[in-house]
Image (cartoon, grey):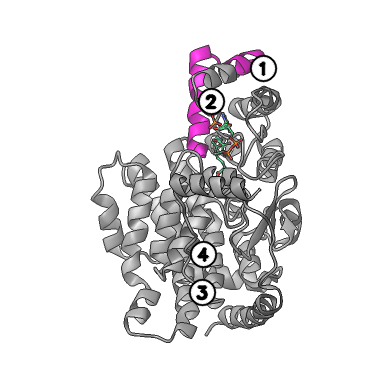
């Protein structure tokens, strides 16, 4: 076993003991009451999951194992010529719970580089799609094709002891994460660059190798990739991609099947596809107004028009956050340093000034502030990665880090199959009648 795997097991054994004691001593404690509106309205705010890798505060934003994004940008290892954190370090932090040393990060980079070879039949599956197929459809299909190599599925078929499940889930996790950049880059080069593929460079870190395979050698684009793949990795457990991965994994579906489920959720416009939608929305606005940099008044009008048409303003709002997303701020800081004069980026900043009061004035939108997706596309466009329907795949490559680290925790802690109770409106009507008779 590699030292990371041993260390993970050591940490998990301690955590399992603590959880056992918590359940024995406090298992009957109630943490909250659940209302009927929560049950009807997307289970919003109901605490029903344990996800060890990160925790979201509605005002402060995400913390990964207790560290905020600005803290991670300070404390995680950087590439020797870079300023942004290496996503390998965040993966270590989420898995082990501690800030890694530079050697730990190098170890993960080397492990992923070693495991990054993608079998040809996966490319054949991608090739079997019409080029016009959405990149997220191709990406999910490729993940399912990779599943044929699942160590967990094979070991389960052979009848392993359930105490060993975690070890195979860990192996699958490391291999799947290692291969995702190659798969994603293949889809990109096939769809937009006439199938002129670029071989991986095993000497590069995970994010810069991804940039390289996409065809971008600019150092500051590589820095952007390190930041991008770090900040999109995890957002606690209840978001659609994390929850779907966890839910499907709870049936002991292997990491490939579980992650594919997460990705089909990420492909929805209210979740990860919003990064594509933001760019389309901005471009449509610019086209309609015949301007690369519309004025704040024009933006305000366009927002009102969008709302009047019964559509969402993409990149704004959140189910949990109630302030500007720190992932938006991290990208804004990056843009201020690297490309402050870009017209679309300036428009993103103007929207940030104009949209919140308008959204707030509707009286119904609970969070009028921008989320991560409001900024990411404009940065990618600045560097020439202009094909916005690919952006959610990039989000997906990053999201693998969080949801698969969590899946390792789910299995090592032996979490059971997930099966919440559902009810019917008939049941609710009877319940209301009964409670009224009692009071
Ligand atoms: N534009 C217009 N209307 C919005 C809105 C927005 N940006 N955000 C919320 N609303 C509307 C909702 O559609 C809802 O309307 P109805 O009552 O008519 O159904 C009402 O405001 C209340 O919604 P909410 O409680 O504020 O938000 P939810 O928790 O239901 O939904 C989210 C959260 C993100 C789906 C929603 O804000 C949205 O659709 N935003 C735009 C899409 C987007 O940016 N998604 C990316 C989120 C981040 C991510 O997961 O990647």
| Local SS, label 3 | helix
Instruction: Specify whether tag 1 is near ligand 1 (CB below 8 Å).
Output: no
- Could you tell whether 368 is left or right of 241 in the image? right
Q: Are marks 2 and 1 in contact (CB under 8 Å)?
A: no
N-terminal of the pair, mark 3 or mark 4, is 4
Disc nearest the viewer among 1 and 4: 4
Provide the major secondary structure of the magenta segment. helix
Q: Are marks 2 and 4 in contact (CB under 8 Å)?
A: no
Task: Identify the residue shown where x is 35% and y is 47%.
Answer: 137
Q: Position of residue 268 (x, y in %)?
A: 44, 42
Q: Position of residue 225 (x, y in %)?
A: 57, 50
Disc nearest the viewer among 1 and 3: 3
Task: Identify the residue shown where x is 34% and y is 49%.
Answer: 138
Q: Which residues are magenta?
A: 274-301
N-terminal of the pair, mark 3 or mark 2, is 2
Q: Which residue is mark 4?
A: 404
Would residue 294 be seen by someone viewing this image from the given angle? no
Q: Residue furthest front?
A: 437
Instruction: Specify whether tag 2 is near ligand 1 (CB below 8 Å).
Output: no
Mark identifier at residue 296: 1
Real-space Cα separation, disc 3 to disc 4, in angstroms: 11 Å
Q: Which residue is mark 2?
A: 282
Disc nearest the viewer among 3 and 4: 3
| Local SS, label 2 | helix
Task: In this rendered view, identify the residue nearer to me: 24 or 271.
Answer: 24
């Amino acid at each position: 076993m590699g030292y990371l795997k041993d260390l993970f097991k050591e940490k998990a054994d301690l955590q399992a003991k603590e959880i056992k004691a918590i359940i024995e001593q406090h298992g009957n404690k109630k943490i909250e009451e659940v209302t009927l509106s929560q049950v009807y309205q997307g289970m919003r705010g109901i605490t029903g999951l344990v996800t060890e890798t990160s925790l979201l505060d509605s005002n402060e934003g995400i913390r990964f194992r207790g560290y905020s994004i600005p803290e991670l940008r300070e404390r995680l290892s950087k590439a020797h010529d870079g300023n942004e954190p290496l996503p390998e370090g965040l993966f270590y932090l989420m898995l082990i719970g501690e800030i890694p040393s530079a050697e730990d990060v190098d170890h993960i980079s080397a492990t992923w580089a070693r495991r990054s070879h993608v079998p040809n039949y996966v490319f054949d599956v991608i090739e079997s799609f019409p080029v016009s197929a959405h990149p997220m459809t191709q990406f999910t299909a490729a993940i399912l094709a990779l599943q044929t190599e699942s160590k967990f599925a094979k070991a389960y078929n052979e009848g392993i002891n359930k105490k060993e499940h975690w070890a195979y889930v860990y192996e699958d996790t490391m291999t799947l994460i290692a291969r995702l950049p190659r798969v994603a880059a293949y889809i990109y080069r096939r769809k937009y660059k006439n199938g002129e593929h670029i071989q991986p460079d095993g000497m590069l870190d995970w994010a810069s190798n991804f940039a390289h395979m996409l065809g971008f050698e600019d150092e500051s684009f590589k820095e952007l990739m390190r930041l991008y793949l770090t900040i999109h990795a995890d957002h606690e457990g209840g978001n659609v991609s994390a929850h779907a991965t966890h839910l499907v994994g709870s049936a002991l579906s292997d990491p490939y099947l579980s992650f594919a489920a997460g990705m089909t959720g990420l492909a929805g416009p209210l979740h990860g596809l919003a990064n594509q939608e933001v760019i389309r929305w901005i471009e449509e606005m610019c086209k309609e107004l015949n301007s690369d940099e519309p004025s704040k008044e024009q933006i305000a009008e366009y927002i009102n028009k969008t709302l009047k048409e019964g559509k969402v303003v993409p990149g704004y709002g959140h189910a949990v956050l109630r302030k500007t997303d720190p992932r938006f701020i991290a990208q804004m800081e990056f843009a201020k340093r690297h490309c402050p004069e870009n017209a679309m980026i300036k428009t993103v900043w103007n929207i940030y000034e104009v949209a919140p009061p308008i959204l707030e004035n509707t009286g119904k939108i609970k969070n009028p502030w921008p989320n991560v997706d409001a900024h990411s596309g404009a940065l990618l466009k600045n560097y020439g990665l202009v094909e916005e329907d690919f952006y959610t795949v990039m989000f997906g490559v990053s999201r693998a880090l969080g949801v698969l680290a969590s899946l390792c925790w789910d299995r090592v802690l032996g979490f059971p199959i997930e099966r919440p109770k559902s009810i019917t409106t008939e049941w609710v009507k009877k319940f209301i009648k009964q409670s009224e008779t009692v009071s």
